[in-house]
Image (cartoon, coloured by chain):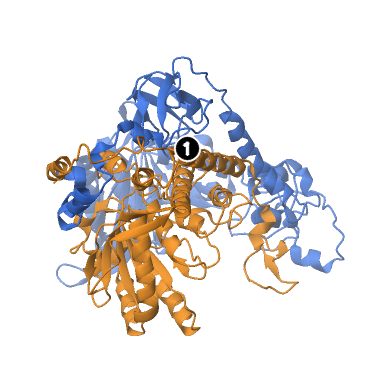
Chain colours: A orange, B blue
Amino acid sequence: MFSLTLRQISRNSFVGANVSAFNVSKYSTVPEATLDIQKCTLHKLEHGPPTQATVTREDAIRFYRDMRTVRRMETMAGNLYKAKQIRGFCHLYSGQEAVCVGMESSITKDDAVITAYRAHGWTYVRGVAPHAILGELTGRASGCAKGKGGSMHMYTKNFYGGNGIVGAQVPLGAGIAFGLKYENKPNICVTLYGDGAANQGQLFEAYNMAKLWNLPCVFVCENNGYGMGTSVERASASTDYYSRGDYIPGMRIDGMDVLAVREATKFAREYALNNGPILIEAATYRYHGHSMSDPGTSYRAREEIKEMRETRDPITVFRRKILECNLVTPEELKKVDIEVDKEIDKAADQAKKDPEIPLGELYNNIYIHPDPDYTVRGCDPSIRVISH
Amino acid sequence: MASAFGHFGRRSIQFTGFRRILHYDPCNVVQRSTSEIRSFHLNRNVDASIPVAMPALSPTMTEGTIVKWHKKEGDPISPGDMLCDIQTDKAVITFDIEEEGILAKILKAENSKNVKIGSMIAVMVEEGEDWQNAEIPESSESSSEASTSSEPSSAPSAGEPTARIRMSPAARKMMEEYNISSPQTVPATGPHGMVNKGDVLKYIQTQHLTKIDLRKAAQVPPSPQKSTPTTPSTPTSSPVTRVPPSITVSPEGGYQDIETTNMRRVIAKRLTESKTMIPHSYVSIECKVDAAMKLRKKFIASGTKISMNDIIVKAAGYSLQRVQKVNSHWSGDSIQIQPTVDISVAVATDSGLITPIVRNAAELSLSQISSTTKALAVKARDGKLQPQEFQGGSFTISNLGMFGIGEFSAIINPPQTAVLAVGTSVLKPSAEGKPCSYLTVKMSYDSRAIDETEASQFLEKFQQVMENPSLLMV
């Protein structure tokens, strides 16, 4: 496989045809450019998303910045974990940034998103600031859930988390879509899950109900090749996850290309609002192990990870593309890099220094609107504390 | 090599568009320079060197050993590269680094042991920097550890819902029971200054507090009164009755101590010594005692009152004469076969079980044994036994037949080597179908001195004699 692809690459090298970005004038940039996207494999769809995408300068810089932020934030989370500032579970999204950034760009703030536990990137694109995310991971009061929940409990408006149980969020996502349809809202619910969860039974129940009632639900399978430590070939009889919806049309897209994801999501949103559920399989990759306790190298070769980092890294590839098409200058991107790094470093410092919540918070957030004199009993019968 | 691309290798064939992408993509993959990959991460803090701290590669790790460095000073580092192998508390794990730059200095060389989490192990600089002259940033890890550890400890005390002494529920109950009005006086040894049940118990012991009856205390107007420490009431110092004491609920509590007499204490000590030091083994046998009973009736009819026990004593004496090994003392590391058969007969008295000795039991007649035993029993119950009357002996017989006990095992009385426990006689169908009286005897013997064969021989003889008492006449 490997040698075959390599031969392909070498055959296609145009020595002169490729204009290095650094030779073209550095001072003029075009306002927008059209880039090619790989064609998607379709299932029960007549036509899929377009094979070309137009991207403006602003969008390009925004995508780049967002992906950089997610990547840097995940790296920082990893470092904090290794410094024992974050404990418990920590599932990192490095390598899959294109999926969250690309999808977010095609949906509105009123569309709902629900995903599993690899949720830090999604939390960010849904509007939570990095210092709130890192604060939540380190368990501080400035975290988005007051530090009470950590990695598994990140929520914001129209973002339903952050779900620990594998595949549990998919029926919930169908339910959210049902709610949206019930209230006649022109919105969809993006329900994400992984290749490991794709074999869970409740997904198929959710597919059935979604298709039966034509719910505006976009099911997205983020296929990163490994379910914890099991590769897809060893886990699934059919690794064509886009066709697993059976009667639900689907497509497989390149999850490492932010523009491909954007176009596909645009197409899918349109489809879901008019015709009912649709399934997207985003072929992506994660660089870290499943979680921080998994080194990630016992079930795959280091060379494979290195290869992916070098040839298909979403940020690197996108950067190269927009530089070569003169959408941006290298200095601009450099500036973005510095800003992002500074922001995340600051957020991490803050996350390390912020205070934890006081012990009295233990008794709060049981009911959303408790009576003013509602008290909770502590472990000791003589302790009663008013709950808010 | 198939693993190198894994499913993506296969996918490259399934992706019908993959090759076409490469064909038409103006930004061709192969034309990139390697520096381009790195420039993506360039320019973080342009002038600062990046410290590399010892990572916690497992949640329980506090320190580790750097086994091997994969990079040398001056090597470029890309995100995801292996930096070094670290031996954690569990295994050797490779430390991957996500930063990018050049490894400027290695601060902890290979085989550095006990490197604490958070301490600096290397310094990196950005690409393009002069790595030879990189400055080593000061370490600030220990302060962060200390601050986080002090924070949680201060948070609970600050955020306590009520300012109170922390105590476990069991400790609180005990404090109520023992009427400790000021909990601060109990020294606390639990985590975060919590008062444990053990602390309260220790305090009670040192202060000699007594339990108060909470029901009574509730009736009394609630003013805490310190009850004067009193010792639990004891029965009068004369030898206590063997009847179990009446369970009266004394004001202090629901239990009562029985004062032990000297004798009971000695019995206790000796029995413990015996049971723990002597390897007891047990053999038992059933004897048909119809003949013996008939003989007894005959004697009673002709005027001599003898009991079953006397016959047993005589039978035992007879058997001991013939299996001399059982008639012995164990003297630490050798067996001393006693010259005469002195059988200690167990007698129950108010103050405990005592074993007066029937000297030379094998030579005495049945009536002699009977009278000796009776006299000794009277003396024992009055407490008037002379020391030589109960010290010594080569064999003990304990008979619980009068209580209806079917079978039991006794504890050997050192330095003797065996004891015979006699049960009651029960009517059972014999091998021919006739109802016969059977008596079960169980011998406990010292395995150091007597082995199974000898013990069995003894019991065989005993059974023979019991079943044919006329042998005793010989």
Q: Is residue B339 left or right of residue A175?
A: left
- Left or right, B288 with reference to A123: left
Residue A356 x, y percent position in the rendering: 64, 48
Residue B190 appears in the picture as rendered:
no
Q: Position of residue B86 (x, y in %)?
A: 37, 29
Q: Is residue A222 left or right of residue A350?
A: left
Residue holding disc 1? A331
Q: Is residue B73 above or below residue B182?
A: above
Residue A16 percent location from the top left of the image: 22, 37
> Quadrant of residue A205 in the image?
bottom left
| Quarter location, residue B261 | top right
Q: Residue lying farthest top? A: B133
Q: Residues within 10 Å of mark 1 (few under 14, many from 20)?
A: few
- Which residue is pictured at 76% across the width and 58% down the height? B212
Q: Is residue B66 above or below residue A330?
A: above
Give the quadrant of the C terminus of chain A: bottom right
Asked whether B201 or A293 is in front, the reply is A293
Above/below status of B73 relative to A18 = above
Disc 1 element: helix
Q: Nearer the viewer, residue B26 or B364?
A: B26
* Of B438 and A285, the residue lying toward us: A285
Q: How many marks?
A: 1
Q: Chain of mark 1?
A: A
Which amino acid does the dot numbered 1 rest on? Glu
Seen in the image, is B430 located left or right of residue B165? left
Question: Percent x, y for residue A322?
Answer: 38, 47
Snapshot quadrant of residue A380: bottom right
Residue B459 visible in the picture: yes
